[in-house]
């Protein structure tokens, strides 16, 4: 079995310097994102019943510090993803992540927070306990759902509603040593399975106001 993401891919984040690391990302990682992007976007288009577009992170704003992670995002907006609920697949040196994401620029954070709090008893128990939650896409820290009390989840959602820079990312985090054992077909299957399980969260971003799409 040939692994899809290799040790060499994860080791890109050990390269010093912005230009050398970006060159390695463009050579090693971004072609794989482009390769899987069309397949995953086709799956999400069928799942969400609307066109989904591929956005590969370019890290164009960086001028000094090299990126500690990279990703490909999937959004129903053709021009961008940061201001919209979206899905991500990406790598850090330590792990691979498969997220549903509302980052700081997302317009629907407040709506999503209210919706999920109202339906928390029904929606939250449907998420696998091994899924993780992150409050900042720029940092490696995350918490497993199994380690969160309901009051902690409510606090996270209330902060998401009130704090402009607050974020919400939920999904599967896979340690590097496991991810390098996945073939391409295993990887795609894991992504699709994860997005099916996260789709109810995505829908909470819109169900009060379809016009906001």
Image (cartoon, grey):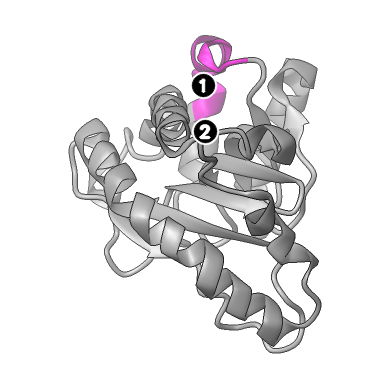
23 vs 123, left or right, is right
83 vs 60, left or right, is left
Verify whether residue 120 appears in magenta.
yes
- In this view, the residue farthest toward the front is 1
The percent position of residue 101, horizontal first and vertical second, equals 52, 46
* Residue lying at 40% horizontally and 33% vertically, measured from the top left: 185
134 w.r.t. 104: above or below: above
* Residue lying at 51% horizontally and 74% vertically, measured from the top left: 58
Please state the extent of the stretch shown in magenta in the rendering.
116-128
Q: Is residue 75 visible?
A: no
In terms of secondary structure, where does tag 1 sit?
A: helix
> Quick check: marks 2 and 1 in contact, CB under 8 Å?
yes
Q: How many marks?
A: 2
The percent position of residue 55, horizontal first and vertical second, equals 39, 63
180 vs 200, left or right, is right
**Disc assigned to residue 210:** none
Is disc 1 surrounded by few (<14), some (14 to 19) or many (20+) residues within 10 Å? few
63 w.r.t. 22: above or below: below
- From the viewer's side, name the closer residue of 1 and 125: 1
Q: Which residue is mark 2?
A: 114
The percent position of residue 94, horizontal first and vertical second, equals 76, 47
* Residue lying at 19% horizontally and 43% vertically, measured from the top left: 50
- From the viewer's side, name the closer residue of 165 and 61: 61
155 w.r.t. 88: above or below: above
**Disc assigned to residue 118:** 1
- CA gap between label 2 and label 1 equals 6 Å
In terms of secondary structure, where does tag 2 sit?
A: helix
């Amino acid at each position: 079995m040939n692994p899809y993401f290799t040790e060499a891919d994860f080791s890109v984040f050990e390269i010093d310097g912005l230009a050398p690391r970006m060159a390695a990302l463009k050579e090693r990682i971004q072609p794989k994102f482009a390769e899987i992007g069309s397949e995953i976007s086709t799956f999400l288009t069928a799942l969400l019943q609307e066109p989904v577009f591929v956005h590969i992170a370019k890290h164009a704003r960086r001028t000094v510090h090299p990126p500690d992670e990279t990703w490909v995002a999937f959004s129903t907006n053709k021009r961008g993803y940061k201001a919209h609920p979206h899905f991500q697949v990406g790598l850090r040196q330590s792990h691979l992540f498969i997220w549903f994401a509302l980052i700081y620029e997302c317009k629907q954070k407040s709506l999503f927070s209210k919706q999920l709090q109202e339906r928390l008893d029904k929606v939250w128990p449907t998420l696998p306990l091994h899924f993780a939650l992150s409050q900042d896409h720029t940092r490696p820290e995350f918490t497993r759902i199994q380690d969160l009390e309901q009051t902690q989840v409510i606090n996270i959602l209330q902060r998401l509603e009130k704090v402009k820079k607050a974020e919400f990312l939920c999904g599967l985090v896979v340690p590097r040593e496991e991810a390098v054992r996945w073939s391409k077909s295993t990887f795609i299957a894991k992504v699709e399975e994860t997005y099916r399980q996260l789709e109810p969260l995505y829908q909470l971003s819109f169900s009060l106001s379809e016009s906001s799409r």
